[in-house]
Image (cartoon, rainbow, N blue to C red):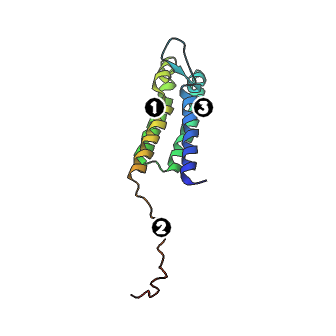
Amino acid sequence: MNIETNIDFELDRLRRLAWRMDAIFQIPRTPIKIGLDNIVGFIPVAGDLLTALPGLWMINQARKLGASPGTLAYMVLNTVFDTAIGMIPIFGDLFDMFYCANIRNFKALERNLNKKAARAKPVRTTIRTVAWSNPNLLA
């Protein structure tokens, strides 16, 4: 496996986690999507603290993938904001349905890594060889 395959695999894992946490299914006849974050978040305080753990894991994985410090700070603020507001009874649960911090974090990470990839310089991998037609290396 090369590094691109590993990054694609890891991004796919993070994408699936983000959508599971924020948008597993849609409420019929509405654009509202519900995820595990919303369901577990109904448990006062403990539910919101529990749902912060996958977000923190996503941030750690983003760090390992090479996300910029600004993106990591944005992700941390998103997760803290989502957890803090989510602890407010009823309002926090409604807020969680519309804010979708995990999806926002994933999209920010994806944007950041795409920008880094676009700025990356290609690495020259060709090896210079000396032709036998001119064996004099000093010429």
Q: Which circle's residue, 3 or 2, is located before the other in the chain?
A: 3
Location of mark 1 (residue): 81
Q: Earlier in the sequence, mark 3 or mark 1?
A: 3
Say left or right for 2 vs 75. right
Which residue is disc 2 drawn over? 126
Circle 2 Cα neighbour tier, 10 Å, few/some/many (<14 / 14–19 / ≥20): few
Q: Which residue is mark 3?
A: 50
User: Which callout, 1 or 2, points at the residue further toward the start of the chain?
Assistant: 1
| C-alpha gap between disc 1 and disc 2 | 49 Å
* Residue closer to the observer: 95 or 46: 95
Residue in view at x 60 percent, y 31 percent: 50
Residue 24 on image: x %, y %: 58, 24
Q: Residues within 10 Å of mark 3 (few under 14, many from 20)?
A: some
Secondary element at tag 1? helix
Which numbered disc, 1 or 2, marks the residue closer to the eye? Answer: 2
Vertical order, 119 against 110 (above or below): below
Q: Amino acid at mark 3?
A: Leu
Residue at (47% x, 79% y) in the render: 131
Query: Element at badge 3?
Result: helix
Tag 1: amino acid: Phe
